[in-house]
Image (spheres, rainbow, N blue to C red):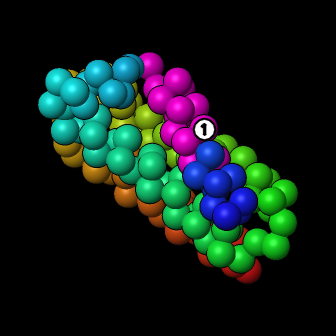
Amino acid sequence: MLHSSVTIAMLGAGVLIYMKVTPYDDLALIREGNIAAAISLGGAVLGFGLPLAFTMASSITIWEVLIWGLVTLILQLIAYRLSDAILRDLPQRIVDGEIAPALFLVSIKLAVAAINAAAVTG
């Protein structure tokens, strides 16, 4: 139960930090019906959640969950910045509701998450 609680807290904290890093209000855009913002934030949730789930499944101590959770957060923020550098002006394109860049961003987030999850299980 402790592992599960810590993992869920790490997921929530990671998503909140991610939303603070993006220069737009993810939730406001989603409430307005912006599909690109929903895709992007959904990718962030999955990008954090998948490696955390593998960490929880294979960890013995809470410290492992905390350390891998931090690594996951850092890697997902790097994935966001890398996508922004490749696509140029990614934040504005998401605000404008462009689906293509949001899907590309999610694919990068999920690829990084899969690699990170594999690293956790060794």
List the residue tagged with mark 1: 13
Q: Nearer the viewer, residue 105 or 37?
A: 37
Residue occupying the point 38% across, 20% down: 24
Closest to the observer, 82 or 60: 60
Residue 64 position, x and y percent, is 80, 62
Disc 1, SS: helix
The reply to whether the magenta stretch includes residue 12 is: yes
Query: In this figure, what is the number of numbered marks?
Result: 1
Q: Residues within 10 Å of mark 1 (few under 14, many from 20)?
A: some
Q: Is residue 115 visible?
A: yes
Q: Looking at the image, which residue is at 22% across and 45% down?
A: 100
Which amino acid is tagged 1?
Ala
| Residue at 69% over, 52% down | 6
- Assign the magenta stretch its main secondary structure: helix
Q: Which residues are magenta?
A: 10-23
Furthest residue to the left?
33
